Image (tube, helix red, strand yellow):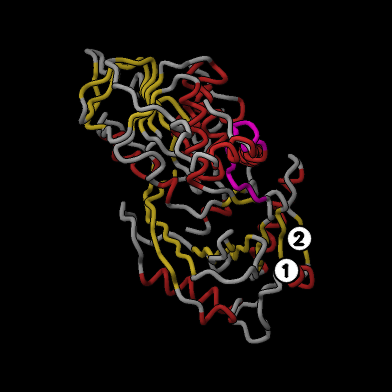
């Protein structure tokens, strides 16, 4: 693999950038592999990378019905954070933040990581109690989540207007310094490049159409539009479509899938250098490196697999944002999109073997972008050893049978 550096950039500039090596190979599809990963998004590619790096498992095929990183990895607002409530969730996502911090160096790829912090605007006494509880829980495990007064909030977010006439004025703020942003497609490309270097095969335009089963019902491979592929294990990392894909194997998962939309404004000069989140009204925003305001809110109220805009949700998000940031009312919207996200009934992820032998799932990602590195690390451990990783041992499917729910209250309340 060609190493990226200032010198390689300068050297290739002399040849008009015509002699760069391909970032990953296009190889013939083989008849069998040790592991087939379904889904070449962030979690699927991260899993493949960690299988090869940590466990030496290189007989791995990652199949993708579209193009690499073109699913939910391309349909998010690229925020990274660890401000959760449950002990397992805090440690899990804190590890992900730390992996993100070192990813550019480890994978030799600039992911445009920017650790700019998140400011939660607290607009009700009940939410303040909730976030104070979360702050104390996080303090036990390392991540910082500090309650600050409105004077400090105005210093951190000077773009906020006069709040005297606001219907629901903020009472305080909570600052999460470890929160960050990164370039979403760079995450997919960097993992694909590094996994390919270690022998993993990536097959785009390869759509799963069914599963191969033996006489006992165990999954022994997959059917695709390019032919059958035998596999010792099949790992689903199919983002908002996992419930649909698992149903092909007769497996019903405790998931709800909804559309989550976002939009960006026309580019403007830098005015917001932190991530701003309003849990009470369900709106968040940040400013991209290109100057666009990236804005989002809650999911659509009705479960669906759609990936588009919903005017009602859009109108509610804009109204809530303009109350706090009236100066943005003259901005024009540049583009809008939606992504089908799925989450478990307790709003915590599922990284687990399934009752169907040979079939594994990584799903239930409410905001899965922030967990791509640790999700792949722990999923790879499960696939390679058939034992849950210590960071993910409470995220198995069995918790739904044994009443061991991992309820993330702060996330459930936003639905």
Question: Residue 38 appears in which quarter of the rendering?
Answer: top left
Q: CA distance from mark 1 to mark 2?
A: 7 Å
Q: Secondary structure at mark 2?
A: strand
Judge from the rendering whether residue 332 lies leftward or rightward of residue 139; answer left or right.
Answer: left
Residue at the image point whose x is 59% and y is 42% from the top: 110
Overall secondary structure of the magenta section: loop
Looking at the rendering, the stretch of residues picked out in magenta corresponds to 102-114
Judge from the rendering whether residue 40 lies leftward or rightward of residue 111; answer left or right.
Answer: left
**Between 32 and 387, the one nearer to me in the picture:** 32
Judge from the rendering whether residue 203 lies leftward or rightward of residue 334; answer left or right.
Answer: left
**Between 399 and 2, the one nearer to me in the picture:** 2
**Between 410 and 69, the one nearer to me in the picture:** 69
Asked whether disc 1 touches disc 2, contact meaning CB atoms under 8 Å apart, the reply is yes
Label placed on residue 265? none
Q: Position of residue 361 (x, y in %)?
A: 41, 31
Q: Secondary structure at mark 1?
A: strand
Q: Position of residue 291 (x, y in %)?
A: 57, 65
Judge from the rendering whether residue 74 lies leftward or rightward of residue 207; answer left or right.
Answer: right
**130 vs 209: above or below:** below
Mark 2 burial class by Cα count in 10 Å: few <14, some 14-19, many 20+: many
Q: Position of residue 196 (x, y in %)?
A: 46, 25
Q: Residue furthest bottom?
A: 165
Q: Is residue 88 visible?
A: no
Residue at the image point whose x is 45% and y is 41% from the top: 364
Residue at the image point whose x is 63% and y is 31% from the top: 106
Return the residue at label 1.
172
Q: Position of residue 143 (x, y in %)?
A: 73, 45
**Between 352 and 235, the one nearer to me in the picture:** 235
Return the residue at label 2.
147
Residue at the image point whose x is 33% and y is 42% from the top: 241
The mark that comes first in sequence, 1 or 2, is 2
Q: Is residue 52 visible?
A: yes
């Amino acid at each position: 693999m060609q190493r990226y550096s200032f010198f390689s950039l300068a050297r290739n500039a002399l040849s008009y950038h015509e002699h760069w090596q391909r970032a990953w190979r296009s190889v013939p599809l083989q008849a069998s592999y040790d592991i087939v990963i379904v889904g070449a998004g962030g979690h699927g590619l991260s899993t493949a990378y960690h299988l090869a790096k940590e466990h030496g498992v290189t007989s791995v095929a990652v199949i993708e019905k579209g193009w690499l990183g073109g699913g939910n990895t391309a349909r998010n607002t690229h925020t990274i954070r660890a401000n959760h409530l449950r002990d397992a969730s805090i440690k899990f996502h804190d590890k992900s933040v730390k992996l993100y911090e070192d990813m550019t160096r480890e994978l030799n790829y600039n992911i445009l990581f920017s650790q700019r912090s998140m400011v939660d605007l607290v607009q009700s006494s009940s939410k303040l109690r909730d976030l104070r509880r979360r702050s104390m829980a996080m303090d036990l495990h390392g991540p910082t989540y500090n309650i600050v007064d409105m004077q400090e909030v105005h210093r951190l977010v000077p773009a906020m207007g006069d709040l005297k006439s606001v219907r629901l004025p903020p009472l305080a703020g909570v600052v999460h310094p470890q929160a960050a942003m990164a370039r979403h497609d760079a995450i997919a490309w960097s993992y694909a490049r590094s996994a390919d270097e270690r022998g993993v095969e990536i097959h785009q335009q390869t759509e799963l159409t069914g599963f191969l089963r033996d006489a006992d019902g165990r999954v022994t491979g997959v059917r695709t539009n390019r032919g059958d592929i035998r596999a010792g294990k099949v790992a689903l990392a199919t983002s908002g479509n996992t419930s649909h894909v698992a149903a092909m194997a007769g497996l019903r998962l405790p998931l709800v899938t909804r559309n989550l939309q976002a939009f960006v404004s026309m580019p403007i000069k830098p005015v917001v250098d932190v991530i701003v989140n309003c849990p009470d009204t369900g709106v968040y925003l940040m400013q991209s490196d290109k100057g666009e305001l990236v804005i989002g809110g809650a999911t659509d109220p009705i479960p669906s697999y759609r990936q588009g805009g919903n005017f009602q949700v859009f109108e509610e998000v804009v109204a809530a944002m303009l109350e706090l940031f009236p100066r943005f009312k003259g901005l024009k919207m540049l583009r809008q999109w939606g992504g089908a996200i799925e989450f478990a009934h307790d709003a915590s992820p599922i990284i687990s073997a399934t009752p169907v032998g040979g079939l594994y799932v990584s799903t239930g990602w409410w905001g899965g972008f922030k967990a791509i590195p640790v999700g792949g690390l722990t999923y790879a451990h499960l696939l390679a050893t058939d034992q849950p990783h210590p960071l993910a041992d409470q995220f198995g499917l069995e918790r739904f049978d044994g009443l061991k729910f991992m309820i993330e209250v702060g996330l459930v309340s936003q639905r």
